[in-house]
Image (cartoon, rainbow, N blue to C red):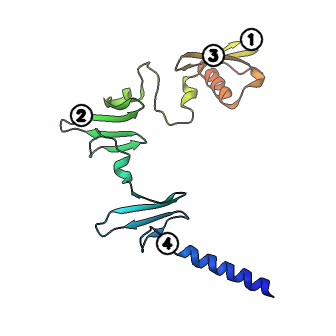
Amino acid sequence: MKFPFIVLFVCLATLAQSRETPAGVPAGAVNVDGHNWRWVDKAGKAWLFRATPFGMMRSEEPNLAQAKRPAGVPVEALPLSEGVWRWIDPQQKVWLFQETPSGLMKTEEPKGAAAAVGPTGLKVADDRADAVLDLMSVKEEGDALRFSRPGPFGTYSWVKKKTQLDKDETAVWDRAQAKSGSVKKD
């Protein structure tokens, strides 16, 4: 009979202890997860308190809106995607700012369809799932097919038998046959 009471007492003690803020965390701090607390001081500055093996660590909460925008990108610039911003200057020129491993790159946005063509003349920044398939070409060599597509280090090419094509290669082969007007031989 003593065992259930001891277990109940230990559980209640654990629950009561987990609700208290540890030493070093101000009263009124909100527990974000088991080891992090968020507290806003009277000036409105937000602080994060983290439990570490060496004690409590206090740090200022980062402002995520400013942290993601690097220096050099105008405040009026609109984010297009992760690491890319679009800005229109007072002369109505449209500029793209892009984060690269070597720093911030600023380029003028091309007009019209030229925006989707890279320096090699190939399509770039196409979000469609079949955009790579548009760049692939195929030639028939007997009972095999030779596929090729441009890559960053030159043209990649490979040969497959007609019976061993995957779905992408089948789509490219069907497209090539439709363009040439020939009928598929199996």
Tell which of 143 and 125 is nearer to you. Answer: 125
Does dot 3 land on a helix, a strand or a loop?
strand
Badge 1 element: loop
Q: Along the line of sight, which residue is nearer the eye, 71 or 13? A: 13
Front residue of 17/154: it is 17
- Name, please, the residue furthest toward the right: 1
| Residue 113 spot, x, y in % from top left | 38, 28
Tell me the number on the disc at residue 142: 1
Q: Are marks 4 and 2 in contact (CB under 8 Å)?
A: no
Q: Are marks 1 and 3 in contact (CB under 8 Å)?
A: no
Q: Nearer the viewer, mark 3 or mark 4?
A: 4
Q: For the C terminus, which image quadrant?
A: top right
Q: For the residue marked with disc 1, what is the amino acid?
A: Gly
Using the numbered discs, state the Cα–Cα distance from disc 4 to disc 1 in whole angstroms. 76 Å
Q: CA distance from mark 4 to mark 2?
A: 54 Å
Q: What type is the residue that disc 4 sits on? A: Thr
Mark positioned earlier in the residue sequence (2 or 3): 2
Which residue sits at x=76%, y=14%?
Answer: 143
Q: Residue furthest bottom?
A: 1
Three-letter amino acid code at disc 3? Ser
SS at badge 2: loop
| Residue 77 horizontal/vertical position (percent) | 29, 43
- Residue at the left extreme, as displayed: 91
Residue denoted by label 3: 157
**Taking 10 as reference, is 110 above or below it?**
above
* 102 is higher (above) or lower (below) than 85: above
Q: Crowdedness of circle 1 by 10 Å Cα count: few (<14), some, many (20+)?
A: few
Q: Amino acid at mark 2?
A: Lys
Q: Which residue is mark 4?
A: 21
Question: Which mark is first along the chain, 1 or 4?
Answer: 4
Which residue is located at x 54 percent, y 75 percent? 19
